[in-house]
Image (cartoon, rainbow, N blue to C red):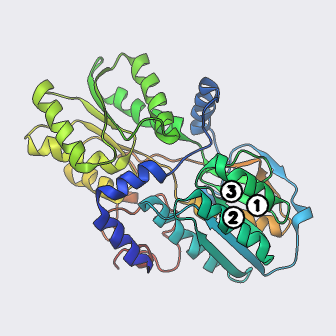
C-alpha cells in the first residue's frame, strides 16, 4: 500500500488505530523486575541533562554513554542494509517508517540496497523474517525493531553471530546488538505531563486519569510516574479509567464524570489519541476546558492551539527511526557509536514552542517529533499537503 494510502487507511480505522497502538505500539526497555525508583530517578535526571551532539539535530544527539569502538565491523561500502520491522500497526510507526525511508534516500551514496520485512505485529513472522535475512547472506548489517523483547531475543542473538545488529524502539534481552537506540523513556513521559498539571491547578485540585489498558509496560511506566507526582503533590484523582484508546468511550466517560462531579481541573492521559475526545466532552457540555495533556499528534496540537486550553505534550520521538539508519552506517564505517544504548533526547511541547510543531497541512495522525521537516518530499510524503 502506498504511504499516503496507508495513512488514509489508518485514519479510517478510527478507534482501531488506538487499540493497535495500545496493544502493539511503543514499548521501552522498562519491563518487569526493574528497579522502578532507580529508573525513575535516572530518567528524570536525563530530562534535565544536556545531550551531546548538534542541538538542531536531536536524532544525532545522545546522553552520556561509552562510545564503542566499531572498527572490527568496518567494511567497504556501499552497504546492503536489512530491516526487520515489528509492524506498521499504528500512526507513530507509519510516521517513523516514512522517515526511515527518507533517511535511506539521503544516504543513497552509502547504501546499495535496503531490504525491509514487515513482521505484521507477529513474533513468529518476525522471527522468520530475521532467519531469512541471515540465511540469505546478503545483509551487511541488520536493523531490528522487535515486536516483543523476549520472543525475539534468540533470533537476534543468532543474527549477531553473522552481522552487526542495531535495535531501536523496543529492546531485546541480550547485549549482543552493537547498540540499542531509544529515547529517555516512559517514566519521564508520564511525569512531565503530571508535573505540568500540578503547576497549573489549585492545590488539591481534581484530576481525571484516562489510561489505555492494564499490564502494558509502556502505559504502566507512564502512569507509575504520574501517580507518584500526583501523590507527592496531594492531587485529588477523582477517576482512573481504562478507555482502551477508544475516542467514543473516552468522550462518554469524561461526560459522565462532568455530570457527576462538575468541575474537573485537569485530564491526564497515557495516550495522546484520546486527548481531543476529552476536550470535546467539555465543549459539548458547555464547560470551560481544564488542563488536558497529550502528545505530539497533529490533531491534539491543532485542537490545543485552536481551542486555547492549557495543554502539554510529552513525546516519544519518531526521529529515532532516522537514528537507527545513521547508527548502522557509522558501525559499518568503523566509527564509534554510543553503546550499549544510544539514548536520545525526549523533548516536550509547551505553549512556548507549540506553533513550531503545528502544521494544518499534515495528517491529523502525523507525529510531529519526526525530525523529518528538512527531508525530501516533506510534507506530501508524510500524507500532508503543500
Viewer-side residue, 89 vs 322: 89
In contact (CB < 8 Å): disc 1 and disc 3:
yes
Q: How far across and down, in percent of the image, does residue 284 sit?
A: 10, 45
Q: Earlier in the sequence, mark 1 or mark 2?
A: 2
Q: Identify the residue at image location x=24%, y=43%.
A: 250
**Residue bearing the label numbered 3:** 167
Where 24 sits versus 335, above or below?
A: above
Where 281 sits versus 197, above or below?
A: below
Q: How far across and down, in percent of the image, does residue 282 sit?
A: 15, 41
Query: Dot 3: within a 10 Å radius of its alpha carbon, few (fewer than 14), some, or many (20 or more) residues?
Result: many
**Residue bearing the label numbered 2:** 143
Q: Identify the residue at image location x=67%, y=78%.
A: 114
Farthest residue to the left: give it.
286
Q: Which mark is residue 165?
A: 1
Q: Is residue 203 left or right of residue 105?
A: left
| Distance from the alpha carbon under mark 3 to that under mark 2 | 6 Å
Place residue 234 in its image quadrant: top left
Amino acid at each position: 500500500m502506498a504511504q499516503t494510502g496507508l495513512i488514509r487507511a489508518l485514519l479510517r480505522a478510527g478507534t482501531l488505530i488506538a487499540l493497535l497502538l495500545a496493544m502493539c505500539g511503543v514499548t521501552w526497555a522498562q519491563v518487569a523486575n526493574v528497579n522502578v525508583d532507580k529508573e525513575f530517578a535516572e530518567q528524570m535526571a536525563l530530562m534535565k541533562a544536556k545531550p551531546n551532539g548538534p542541538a538542531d539535530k536531536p536524532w544525532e544527539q545522545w546522553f552520556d554513554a561509552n562510545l564503542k569502538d566499531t572498527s572490527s565491523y568496518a567494511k567497504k561500502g556501499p552497504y546492503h542494509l536489512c530491516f526487520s520491522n515489528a509492524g506498521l500497526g499504528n500512526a507513530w510507526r507509519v510516521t517513523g517508517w516514512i522517515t526511515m525511508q527518507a533517511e535511506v534516500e539521503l544516504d543513497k551514496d552509502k547504501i546499495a540496497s535496503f531490504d525491509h520485512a514487515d513482521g505484521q505485529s507477529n513474533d513468529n513472522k518476525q522471527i522468520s523474517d530475521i532467519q531469512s535475512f541471515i540465511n540469505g547472506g546478503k545483509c551487511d548489517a541488520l536493523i531490528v525493531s522487535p515486536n516483543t523483547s523476549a520472543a525475539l531475543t534468540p533470533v537476534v542473538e543468532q543474527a549477531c553471530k553473522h552481522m552487526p545488529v542495531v535495535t531501536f524502539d523496543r529492546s531485546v534481552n541480550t547485549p549482543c546488538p552493537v547498540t540499542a537506540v531509544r529515547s529517555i523513556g516512559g517514566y519521564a513521559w508520564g511525569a512531565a505531563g503530571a508535573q505540568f498539571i500540578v503547576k497549573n491547578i489549585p492545590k488539591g485540585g481534581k484530576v481525571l486519569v484516562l489510561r489505555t489498558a492494564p499490564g502494558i509496560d509502556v502505559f504502566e511506566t507512564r502512569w507509575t510516574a504520574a501517580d507518584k507526582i500526583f501523590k507527592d503533590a496531594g492531587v485529588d484523582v477523582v477517576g482512573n479509567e481504562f478507555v482502551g484508546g477508544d475516542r467514543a468511550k473516552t468522550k462518554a466517560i469524561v461526560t459522565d464524570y462532568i455530570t457527576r462531579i462538575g468541575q474537573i481541573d485537569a485530564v491526564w492521559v497515557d495516550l495522546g489519541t484520546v486527548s481531543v475526545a476529552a476536550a470535546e466532552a467539555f465543549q459539548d457540555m458547555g464547560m470551560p476546558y481544564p488542563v488536558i495533556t497529550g502528545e505530539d499528534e497533529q490533531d491534539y496540537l491543532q485542537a490545543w492551539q485552536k481551542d486555547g486550553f492549557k495543554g502539554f505534550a510529552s513525546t516519544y520521538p519518531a526521529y529515532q527511526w532516522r537514528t537507527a539508519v545513521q547508527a548502522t552506517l557509522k558501525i559499518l564505517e568503523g566509527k564509534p557509536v554510543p553503546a550499549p544504548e544510544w539514548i536520545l533526547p525526549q523533548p516536550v511541547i509547551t505553549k512556548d514552542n507549540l506553533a513550531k510543531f503545528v502544521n494544518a497541512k499534515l495528517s491529523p495522525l502525523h507525529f510531529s517529533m519526526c525530525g523529518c521537516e528538512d527531508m525530501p518530499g516533506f510534507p506530501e510524503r508524510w500524507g500532508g499537503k503543500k
